[in-house]
Image: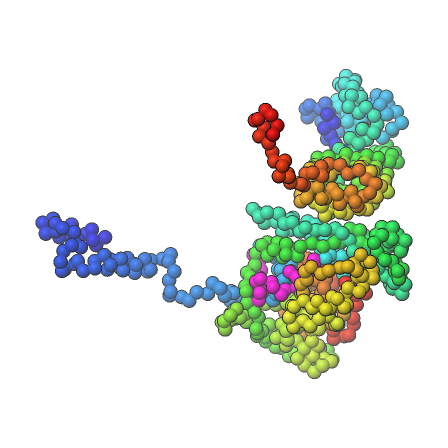
Amino acid sequence: MIRRVLPHGLGRGLLTRRPGTRRGGFSLDWDGKVSEIKKKIKSILPGTPCDLLPDTSHLPPEHSDVVIVGGGVLGLSVAYWLKKLENRQGGMRVLVVERDHTYSQASTGLSVGGICQQFSLPENIQLSLFSASFLRNINEYLAVTNAPPLDLQFNPSGYLLLASEKDAAAMESNVKVQKQEGAKVCLMSPDQLRNKFPWINTEGVALASYGMENEGWFDPWCLLHGLRQKVGVFFCQGEVTRFVTSSQHMLTTDDEMVTLKSIHEVHVKMDHSLEYQPVECAIVINAAGAWSAQIAALAGIGKGPPGTLQGTKLPVEPRKEEEPDPANLEVDHDFFQEKVWPHLALRVPAFETLKVQTAWAGYYDYNTFDQNGVVGPHPLVVNMYFATGFSGHGLQQAPGVGRAVAEMILEGSFQTIDLSPFLFNRFYLGEKTQENNIM
Amino acid sequence: MWSTQNSQLGAPSLDAFPVAAVTNDHNLKTTQSHRYSSGGQKSKSLRLVAPMWNGTRGIHRLGGAVVPEGNQKKERTMLQFLTDHFYDVEALRGYLLQREMCKVHLKNRFRDKEWIRPDKYGHFSPEFWNFREVPVEAVDASDCEINYEGLDNLLLLKELQSLSLQRCPHVDDWCLSRLYPLADSLQELSLAGCPRVSERGLACLHHLQNLRRLDISDLPAVSNPGLTQILVEEMLPNCQVVGVDWAEGLKLGPEEQPQDTASPVPA
């Protein structure tokens, strides 16, 4: 602009040549100077990245109503149901904190993806049945406009459980409970078994139960992806390092001093840096899978004399007894050769010449107490809710559990499926909610 | 021209839809009120087609509840139409059931066995009860929007021998896994053209050991039709599996490349 002004300003008489070619005066590096000035003006104008304020786009928000620790299928399921059951659209701000966006060690992605209703506890059966109907109608629940429909690749094969003489009575009563709850399971005698599956060696088998419908396996990544793209919540990659709690000392009716804690801030640390963001929150959900015990410990759960409520830890560990060391996810091939293959070859003679082609390992969020999930609030840390510890059947129960936790938070009690046997209190009271049919 | 529906087993669902020849609103109103009264006359005519079958009186009542004055004439042409299209009772039964299933979405509310629905006057038609004793042998649900819940109604048919689910848009692998209760009687099944059926669903047909004829042609979701056909044949040894040419999955050999069709002499 200045350049154009010059010829006009100085009049035609004086300037017959272009300013750049004149000696002295305005000519030295005029173009360069003008472009510098242009750059400076551009950087000050709005709409361009400006260094006035530091960039915080990678950090989670400073306030959130609910913080869900763990972005696996359980955490996302709780987030989904919270959003679905909230009374107002956008009424709740939910933040999901997941440490590893590639889900390289998360149990969800490494899971086989089986779904089965052959449990002994009615609650487990109901959860699984609900999940089956959720998966069947997954495109109605998780449809997103303009996104292609989800294909779970469900294989409705059914689970076959075999029982020896001494377990036959238990199996029969379990099947009775399953049928009562609405699962389609049938009992088979060894003869019927041989008839139907001639390749099974029925030696030692007294009774078998076969699931006819709603059992099989599906692709867990698809479910995870579907939940992620549907759930309109803040998603943050980071690790929870600290809970800031405030305590209240109360007296119980027996005049005992009880300290009720409530978490009001969560510190989320970013990957590969020391930077962290304190997130103010009202409710925290522990859906951290195999690492739930560590998150619980951060909130002070288990810090107290053993035998007291304060001293009761969350008994969730990344492994089962007798299984390979969970320090890393390396496949222990010897474990298969020595512990698994003999049983396979005995039961199915065709498997004697079995050769392993590929193998992978994943963690269980194994509940060492009674191998069933932990759901619901903690009695002392009043705003931490658990959704973890499912010991290998978390994926198939995730939709039901997510809904139950969301109901607990929004309504204060379980509305559809009553998961009271899975509350944390049982660890202190010593009441095991044992499942007889573990898979 | 049975544009109406309501012919479900045992259900006098009479919030009537007007029948065939009704052309204006006036007729509509009169049909509803004359529903019961006009029934008596029609039954005589239909006796010629299916004398043993009392139930049709009810259906025909719905079908024939037209304006009283126009009755006789319309009744004859309708009879003609019926005799032309429903040459035997099988076909009529099949057709009626198919029409039932087209109302699956409304009727899905009644997932228990009873499909009884009172009409808006709160009456049940007594004749429909006779219908329930008639065993259904064949169902043609082609192009029908039947879905997973709708199959509840089909699975009650313990003597069903032939089921056709051709081109049903909502029949998928989950639905196929529900078919096992029909294992004792089902002999013929057709899934041709169902867009959502894949080889995983076909695998759960292993329960249907009495199946003699299975049609799995034209299933777009099956990844390898030739291989699937072989596996299904192995799974159901007594069954004739139709629909896939085993050569479909094979590629052309080098000496059988498509020849130049323009040349008059084959190469």
Residue A111 at x, y = what percent? 68, 61
Identify the residue at horizontal 71%, vertical 73% (top origin): A315
Report whether residue A173 is seen.
Answer: no
Please tell me whether residue B64 is drawn above or below residue A304 in the rendered image. above
Q: Is residue A262 left or right of residue A347?
A: left
Q: Position of residue A154 (x, y in %)?
A: 70, 51
Residue at 75% x, 66% y is A337
Above or below A17: residue B242: above
Work out whether residue A424 or residue B254 is closer to the camera in this orientation and state it: B254
Location of residue B239 by image quarter: top right
Residue nearest the observer in this picture, B200 or A315:
B200
Question: Total number of numbered labels?
Answer: 0
Q: Say whether residue B182 is magenta.
A: no
Q: Is residue A97 magenta?
A: yes
Q: Which span is picked out in magenta?
A: A90-113
x and y percent of residue A428 in the render? 74, 75
Q: Quadrant of the C terminus of chain B?
A: top right
Residue at image position (69%, 59%) is: A357
| Residue B76 seen in render | yes
What is the basis of the colouring in this image? rainbow
Is residue A405 toward the left or the right of residue A51 in the image?
right
| Residue at point 13%, 58% (across, down) | A23
Which residue lies most toward the bottom here?
Answer: A305
Q: Locate the N terminus of chain B and report the quarter of the image it occupies.
A: top right
Q: Main secondary structure of the magenta part?
A: loop
Front residue (pair A328, B54): A328
Left or right of B44? Residue B102 is left
Q: Quadrant of residue A40?
A: bottom left
Residue A319: quarter of image: bottom right
Q: Position of residue A378 (x, y in %)?
A: 68, 71
Residue at the extreme top of the image, as rendered:
B73
